[in-house]
Amino acid sequence: MALRLWASSAANALKISCSGATRAAPAYSISRYFSTVLDGLKYSSSHEWVKNDGSVATIGITDHAQVYSQGHLGEVVFVELPEAGAKVSQGGAFGNVESVKATSDINSPISGEVVEVNDKLSETPGLINSSPYEDGWMIKVKPSSPSELDALLDPAKYTKHCEEEDAH
């Protein structure tokens, strides 16, 4: 199991896929061990990411969360997400991720209204493992307090946070 997790992490970091589909690898700023931290995103200390596209922000869990956090979350087997129209609050749980090893809450890095949910995750929750920043996004939110984005971590600060957390 440990070898499979390592191989999966390495393949994800190298953007190698067994699906045969080819896609351009996203630009990334910092690669920590085998987890990837992308430029252009904001991060929470609880390992969620936000991509702000003006009036809508896309939210998911980070590569670090799905690989390293909580004793290696492991392969995601179930995701519970809110419905469109639900309200989320910064720091509050909006769903959970169940893996072969643990169930973890997913906290919203910003407040607002859910305008879209990634329905693919109900049938293919493993997208969180294989593509946490692309196909594995979770919800799209219309921010109610856009200034909350300013309080989130940039890629360098998030990487430092992860390193400090892993050291403990």
Image (tube, grey):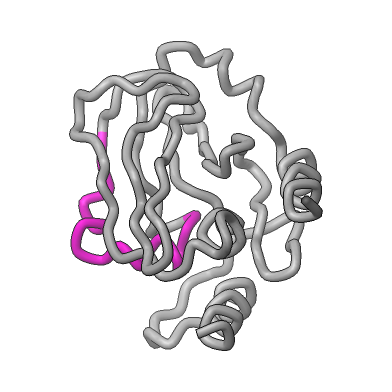
Say if 10 sits above or below 50 in the image. below
Which residue occupies the foreground of this view, 120 or 48? 48
Image point (65%, 21%), residue name: 151
What percent of the width, then of the height, locates residue 22?
45, 79
What percent of the width, then of the height, locates residue 77?
30, 65
Q: Quadrant of residue 124?
A: bottom left
Image point (41%, 58%), residue name: 102
Is residue 132 a member of the stretch shown in magenta?
yes
What percent of the width, then of the height, locates residue 81?
26, 42
Which residue occupies the foreground of this view, 90 or 50? 90
Q: Is residue 6 left or right of residue 1?
A: right
Q: Is residue 49 visible?
A: yes
Number of numbered discs overlaid on the protein picture: 0
Q: Is residue 132 left or right of residue 27?
A: left
Q: Is residue 42 visible?
A: no
Looking at the rendering, the stretch of residues picked out in magenta corresponds to 116-133
Say if 83 sits above or below 151 in the image. below
Is residue 138 a member of the stretch shown in magenta?
no
